[in-house]
Image (tube, helix red, strand yellow):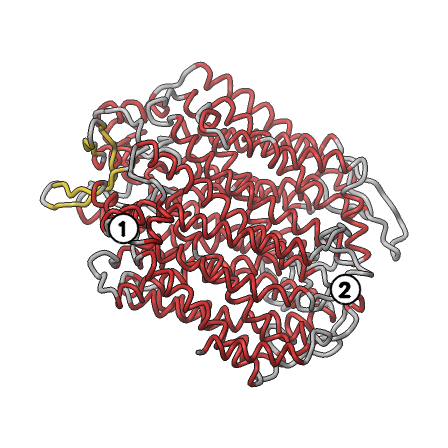
Amino acid sequence: MHERPRLTPIQINRDLLRSCLETPLVFYVLLLLLMGLVGLGVVAATLLVTYGLGVTGLNHPVFWGFFIINFVFWVGISHAGTMISAILRLSAAEWRRPVVRAAEVMTVFSLMTAALFVVLHTGRPWRTLYWAFPYDFVRGIWPDVRSPLVWDPSAIFTYLTGSILFVYAALIPDLALARDKTTGWRRLVYGVLCLGWRGNARQWKLLNATGLLLSALILPVFVSVHSIVSWDFGMSLVPGWHVHIFAPYFVVGAVLSGVAAVIALMAVMRSLFRLHDYIRPEHFDMIGRLLIVVALAWAYFYFIDVIFALLSKEEAEYEVMKLRLSPPYLYLFLLMIVCNVFLPVPIWMFRRFRRNIGIMVWTAIVVNIGMWLERFLIIIPTLQRRHPDAFAWGDYSASLVEISLVIFSFANVGLLLLLFSKVFPVIPIWEEKEGHIWKREFRIGKLRLPAIVRE
Amino acid sequence: MLFLGGVAGFAIRLGAGLEDRGPWGYYAAVFGFLFTVGQAAPMVSFVPRLARARWHGPLTRASQVVAVAGLLNVLLFIPLLWLVPSSAVRTTVWFDWPWGAPHFYDTIFVLMLVVNGFAFLWVQAIPDLAALRVQSGGTHRLARLLSGSFIGTPKQWKVQRIGLAVLGGCYVMNFIFVQSLISLDYVMTLVPGWKSSMFPAFYSINGLLAATAMTIVVMAVIRRFYGLQRYITVDQFWNVAKIMLALNLAWAYHWWADFLTTWYGRVPRETVVIIGTRSFGENVWLFVAAFFCCFVLPLLILMWNPWRKSVAGPTVVAVLSLIGIFIQRIIDYVPAYLNTQDPLDHELHEAIAIPWPGLPDVLIIVGGIAGAVFLVTWAVKALGPLSNWEMQEGVILRRNEKFLNAEVPYVIKPQ
């Protein structure tokens, strides 16, 4: 990387362990704020469990609302970790180093939050167990394997397990370092967690092999998770949902929202933990380039979805799309397109803007607003369409409980990330040091140019 | 000779007229295959350049030179436009745009893509043509004509690099646009077999897979016949093979998503097309062949590092993938052309079996492929099998450096 400053291993240790060993005032302020919002969500969830789904805005025929939108949204965000870590690790992209851990951890916490919303959506969370797991061996009652209630937990828990392993394996050398730099109970905890890491040649070899193996194995899981979420919709015969292209389209959308969220997270980390030497404008530049491709791919799939519904002479499909493209949904549709493509992509085209962290954060937030709206537009207008064989027509407006739980979801992920940063280094220290060791500069003519050891 | 045989086959088909779409299925499949392969390959040289990967130097010419097959594609494309069902009673992607939609505009866009491919190849080859001009003492007419006044000043290099970036970027966007446009034109004919929202995306994935496969095949051929083993190394095969494997998996994923949505949906009009005609049922063996060639065998071969990191492994997989894509094109086009029902009926009541090709079809298939091979061979002869200036740049930007007890290669990355 071109702008990497010369740092000694001691400096790297001190800078990257700072978040674990020092606690600034702003940490407590953020902690209190996020805990307050999470508390609000707990109250809302308690109301939901006590009084049932009546406290939500769900009504016939709109039986999926904010909870499912949020579920899809957070599963989407969770795709950042694998996208950034596994793919960039396999392709040996040098700029991945400071980004990977934050992205991987965000995957874990986003998935946990997403799973929570499926459970909340049932209204009676304890019953989820009956629908999702084979519990009643005696009477031979089994969950229906053709049901998304079985697919989703299978996909999410496989991805969650893989992601936790992914985070943990890459954490081991840093945990050993933390063990060596701390005393008392912290030393004990880090000592247990680092599994006796000494950093000998065999251990490094095993760690590298594990990293590569997990990267390769988690990629199919990463693709399958959002495909399965898309099939929750696609396998139904509901016009507007029974769309063949949904699986790749959902995966691309997930990557767009996830990678955009990583930008916001990187900026927060950089500012909160003073990581300016590690998370540099060139990293935002590289992610910006990646996002141009992903945003255009998303636009391509969305265009096909819209054009197919409008022109394929399927009356029901046409009606749903017409509803999405008519007021009041038209305004949301236009806002979504502007947020996801027309505003950010032209901005990302310019290197000057890609290197401006403030602009990158704002565009990342805008993209995520757009992606949330996209899920809203897939779910709500489709269900609201008047079916000829349904007898009750209801509109959907989210209740205060649902809105509180949406706010809770953001606060929950933020809180978990904040707590993680207090206990574990947010940038992989060993990867950063490895980058420094491999770094070389060569003179060509009058220029000194950076070089990397392999491609 | 083979190409002339293809022309004869085309003449026989044309003699029967353009009113009946049925017999033109194999012709359309040949166009689909050549269009996919020929127009996609130049992208393989651009994408690694965009990612600033330095291993692409030796494969640049091999991938870009395939663009010359585009000439044939334009010629093959024109008769097909008159075989598209009338748009009188349906909506098209052109929204009843006047002045010859889709015939005129589709031709223009295909032509634009071909010209873009030629321009990309030309701009990339200018420094080599200039070197040829100088080496030949100005007697090489083609080099003199195409290299202009290029003498390698910093300004000329800068303009050439900007030209490559702009033309390459335009080419990628143009390719996706034209592939999608043509497939959407097919989708909007409402003919069962094409009418699926997955069709444009699957078409493009086939294109990208064909691009990597064709590049590997051309690399392997010129490496063997020009004795370029020292220049085109395992590195190039290995790196392109990784991308090809990803695309083989993407191919299977897109097919699976389409198939599973249909299988679960159990909508009869979808089932009879996607399962009965395109996957299993009547044409199961063709599908199995495509599936094995594009997914199963590539996965089984390329998942092993020693095979992936070789010349033979990726080449075998590339040939298999091209065969698979050709079979896929037959599945895409032949049954849809044989279906002569009213497109507005939306429905295929019975799966359509793909017949064996007749003599004119065989002549067209062999002649079409031979024509494309002829054009590519001629272009390799005219422009040279390697991009010399990129090879030299690669030498400048690669250094071996001692690291502990080993000597490791470093790749310099200018900003």
Question: Looking at this rendering, what residue extends furthest in the right direction?
Answer: A391
Q: Is the residue at mark 2 from the same chain as the one at mark 1?
A: yes
Residue B193 rendering spot, x and y as whole percentages: 66, 68
Q: Is residue B293 above or below residue A125?
A: below
Residue for badge 2: B86
In which quadrant will I find the C terminus of chain B?
top left
Q: Tell me the residue at 71%/35% (across/down).
A: A334
* Image position, residue B136 (x, y; %): 24, 52
Is residue B93 visible to the viewer in this orientation of the structure?
Answer: yes
Q: Where is residue A101 in the image (x, y as percent from the top left)?
A: 39, 37
Identify whether A12 is placed above or below B258.
above
Can you tell which mark lies on residue B415? none
Mark 1 lies on residue: B132
Name the one closer to the observer, B393 or B202.
Answer: B393
In x, y percent, where is residue B210? 46, 62
Please say if the residues under marks 2 and 1 sit with CB atoms less than 8 Å apart: no
Q: In which quarter of the image is residue A296?
A: top right
What type is the residue that disc 1 sits on? Leu
Q: Residues within 10 Å of mark 1 (few under 14, many from 20)?
A: many
* A6 relative position to B79: left or right: left
Is the N terminus of chain B in the top left, top right, bottom left or bottom right quadrant? bottom left
Work out whether B225 lies above or below A107.
Answer: below
Closer to us: A150 or B264: B264
Amino acid residing under circle 2:
Ser
In three-dimensional space, the C-alpha distance between marks 2 and 1, rounded to whole angstroms, equals 51 Å
Q: Which of B334 and B196 is in front in this view?
A: B334
Q: Which of marks 2 and 1 is nearer the N terminus?
A: 2
In this rendering, would A256 be left or right of B19?
A: left
Chain under callout 2: B
